[in-house]
Amino acid sequence: MTIKVRKNQFIFDILKQASGTLIAQMFAIVAIPVITRFYTPEQYGEYSIFVQILMGVSILLTLRLEHFIVLAESHATANTNLRTIMAIGGCILLLLVLVYLVGGDWILKFSPVSVDGMTVAVLLGIGLILSLNCGIEQTLQKRRMFFKSSVAEAVAKFSFLLLAVLLSMADFGINGIFAALCLGYLFKCCFLLFASNGDIFKGKISFSLKGLLPVRVRAITLVYSHFLLAFTQLIPFTFIMTNYGKEVMGQFSLAFSTLNLVATLGALSMSKVYFQRMSEIDRQVDKKALWNRTFAISLCIALPVYLLVFLLSGWAYGFIFGDSWEMAGKIATIMVVSSFFEFISRPMESTSLVLNVWWYTPIWHTLRTTSMVVLTQVVDPATLSFEYFLILYVAVMSMLFIFDLIVQKLLVLVSK
């Protein structure tokens, strides 16, 4: 009876997380066809690269410590950890400003898109807000307030959609979509502070590294892994833009982002609940059961969803996003294979972190980055068309996700 209740509660927690995520992704789904009618493929491609740079900045600022707040012993400790993390982020922000003032011109030469001093300031500020958002979400999830945690993303998506359209109509051009993204995250932060009753500011305002020291190795691992992830996603974007043009890169960006929406809708919700539940389990048999149950749920969702995406993409992209985006539909038909394997592997990717197998995640991300570097070095754009490059890219990514899924399962089997 206890096991049955736990199973039902696990599914219920996923549904609560997914319901809020569904609202957010509904706005995201509506936003994309609207934005593709206000912004060109070239502008959409630059926006996608800007998002990846923003993720990288966020990683550097708080060293991914906010991702481990859910592991705190109590809610009070979680809030103290969050305040400490934000203080660390503020110090690193000032250090990065100093680095930019000294060598900014040299650093910006490596940016794949045009960036000026104001853009750098915005990136740093919003990067810190992104980390704060994640930290507050972790405190809400620790209190099992999954719905409020996920609704915050809906606030960000709705704000982004509305502002992107308004700023485009006001002739802000590419700066309009950048500003809309940043303001959306800012509004999300305000909602999270309201949903959490401003707990981070309540009681005695204290700071302590004590609660962060036990996770320092795992945090370093996550920094390395997430930074490599952002870099790995930038590699094909910049390669396509350089060798096949901004137009093709924009089409690839749309296919990439829409397929990522599918993964986010279900897999991310399961991932958050899985991480929280796995961190509370001590017995190896229960960990194995949770892994199997999560895998079964993700597989049951992924098979019909991705089959439908495969069958409809070639027609649907042109119909939904406009005639100029038909190429994105053809790209999505190929990319659906790797996206399927990403979907079923994503919920279990935190297994190694929970089991404190800190060395695996950086190894996997190093393998992924190395694979992308090798792929872009081996492919000769002069003799190989974009379609063939895309097929190779999908094949490499699929094999990497399958490898990750197998290893995460083995880690559960050998855990004590």
Image (cartoon, rainbow, N blue to C red):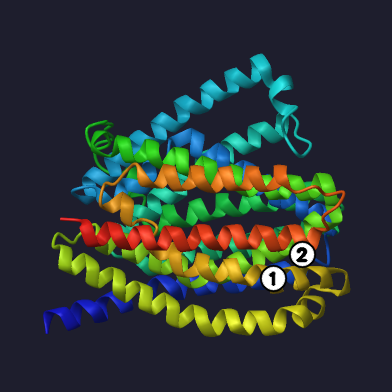
Mark 2 or 1, which is nearer the eye? 1
Cα separation between marks 2 and 1 = 23 Å
> Number of numbered discs present?
2
x, y (%) of residue 366? 50, 42
Image point (60%, 42%), residue name: 231
Q: Using the rendered image of the protein, determine whether residue 101 is visible from the camera's viewpoint.
A: yes
Q: Residues within 10 Å of mark 2 (few under 14, many from 20)?
A: some
Viewport quadrant of the C terminus? bottom left
State the image quarter where residue 99 is shown. Answer: top right
Residue 166 higher or lower than 29, as above or below: above
Q: Is residue 199 left or right of residue 169?
A: left
For residue 35, which numbered disc appears in the image? 2
Judging from the image, what secondary structure is the residue with disc 1 in? Answer: helix
State the image quarter where residue 391 is shown. Answer: bottom right
Amino acid type, label 1: Ile
Amino acid type, label 2: Ile
Image point (72%, 49%), residue name: 237
x, y (%) of residue 284? 16, 63
Q: Is residue 166 left or right of residue 278?
A: right
Q: Using the rendered image of the protein, determine whether residue 24 is visible from the camera's viewpoint.
A: no
Residue 325 higher or lower than 53, as above or below: below
Nearer-N-terminus badge (2/1): 2
Image point (86%, 56%), residue name: 247
Q: Which residue is mark 1?
A: 334
For residue 43, which numbered disc appears in the image? none
Between 61 and 149, the one nearer to me in the picture: 61
Image point (77%, 72%), residue name: 330
Viewport quadrant of the N terminus? bottom left
x, y (%) of residue 315? 78, 82
Q: Residues within 10 Å of mark 1 (few under 14, many from 20)?
A: many
